[in-house]
Image (spheres, rainbow, N blue to C red):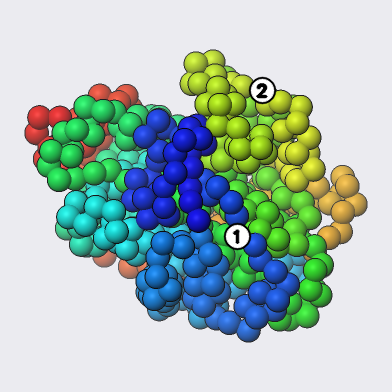
Amino acid sequence: MHYTSTRDASVRVTAAQAISAGISAEGGLFVPTQLPTVTPADLQAWAALPYAARATAVLSRFLTDFTAEETAACCKAAYGERFDTPAVAPLRTMGDGRYILELWHGPTCAFKDMALQILPHLMRVSISKTAPNQKIVILVATSGDTGKAALEGFKDAPGTEILVFYPQDGVSDMQRLQMVTQEGDNVHVCAIKGNFDDAQAGVKSLFTDPAVLAALQAKGMHFSSANSINWGRLVPQIVYYISAYCDLLASNDIQMGDAVNIVVPTGNFGNILAAYYAREMGLPVGKLICASNRNRVLTDFFESGTYDCNRPFYTTTSPSMDILISSNLERLLYHLSGNDAVEIARLMESLKKDKKYTVSPQVRQAMDELFAAGCADDSVVAQTIRRTFEDTGYLCDTHTAVAVAVQEDYRARTGDNTPTIIASTANPHKFAPAILDALGAADSADAYAMSQELEEKTGCCVPAPLRALRDKAIRFTDVCEKDKAGMQAAVNRLLQLDGI
Ligand SMILES: *Cc1c(COP(=O)(O)O)cnc(C)c1O
């Protein structure tokens, strides 16, 4: 199995090369040239397996240059005791055809752990095949959750340094505390005076800057990415949609072949793209429902066929979705355009130059068939958290509530009663102030007191890793300018790379 670039059809690399490079040299994203399939017999067999074994089965079809032992060892190391439930990604039934897929039982309490607990292992194996003596510098742009999950995954991983950029005023208190207290000898954290899109653009341009790359190379180092532009982030995310289907089979909630809808609260389009891949592989999925917050650039795109980020950027109660440039949409458009790298290069050039593009009627039609989209602003999110808690006793975080609200709206609008999996992406305690506010109980104390209050009010316990933060020292206070020069200076300073 090989991977190519969304912007250059002549690229052919192995999984190990795609994972260790992170992004293709001309700026495109790696995509499989052909997808493996999932058959009913596979699903039947996997329904009887624990999560790590399901992951091994799925990943081994993508990582064909890894040995079976290597893939199994990565999955076993990732999906074990660092998750607080043996199910790893448990599916909770709401009793009305809706199922909440909880993806936040890992060490940082957000769904990013599902991929970032395994990525360092995949990276280690990949590097051993592609660049055995190089030091890997992981550069991360985060809207809040990726940063912490990547730090936790890569801390003290041999042969790696990790550097995370987060928007200074764009993350929750708890998210910031998680990052600035990070332990480990190879970790660096820096705030930028800008938003997530600035951080992501800066990281991407550092990745592809020939001068920076040459200087790094001279020091025996090379960059890689822990953002969902890295194929190694996406492929582990395909697993939990397949796993959720297996759980529904095992509990007899559905019969083999029954379609399910999947709703995903979306920012960078990574998580929902993984659901799209699961569907393309043969998982019986009806609609993929893309849920946005007030930054509704994706909703408008699915409605109009024009992606346009000439619009205000809003800070919302679901900060991990405060994104205007959804990187992974590039991969979807590549596939829907019939693998047309020339067309994708053109669209991405237009995005860079005019901050917008319009897709062809053919792509538009494919989008309509596969996807539905909707958005929910902060007030709808607050009402949804409160109503869902009062009606069902289930407490959702602000991101999950975006998905719940969009799903309810979709069902009311279309009458589509297909069983539905809703991706739940964070533990409510990461966003306690907004959730307390939704429940009508906010006070003005610090993040820890808020979390304690949320526990007392709802019975939803503060997770141990968040409780433990209070006793940790703040290690990182760096701030840099949002432009490439500012970020480059921070890289030089933090990694002590004089002369770049
Ligand atoms: C990252 C994140 C999202 C958005 O996921 P994408 O893959 O970027 O679309 C949603 N919710 C939470 C809690 C997140 O951390």
Taking 29 as reference, is 362 left or right?
right
Whole-percent x and y of residue 63? 46, 61
Residue 291 or residue 370, whichever sits in front: 370
Whole-percent x and y of residue 500? 15, 30
Determine the residue positioned at 81% across, 75% down.
Answer: 255
Q: Which residue is mark 1?
A: 36
In the displayed structure, 26 sits above or below 86; it is above
Mark 2: C-beta under 8 Å from nearest atom of ligand 1: no
* Three-letter code for the amino acid on which mark 2 is drawn: Thr
In the displayed structure, 350 sits above or below 277; it is above
Taking 168 as reference, is 275 left or right?
right
Residue 318 can be seen, yes or no? no
Residue 219 can be seen, yes or no? yes
Distance Cα–Cα, label 1 vs label 2: 30 Å
Front: mark 1 or 2: 1
In the displayed structure, 429 sits above or below 342; it is below
Residue 203 or residue 165, whichever sits in front: 203
Q: Residues within 10 Å of mark 2 (few under 14, many from 20)?
A: some
Provide the secondary structure element on which disc 2 rests: strand
Q: Which residue is mark 2?
A: 358
* Three-letter code for the amino acid on which mark 1 is drawn: Pro
Taking 140 as reference, is 453 left or right?
right
Whole-percent x and y of residue 108? 41, 62
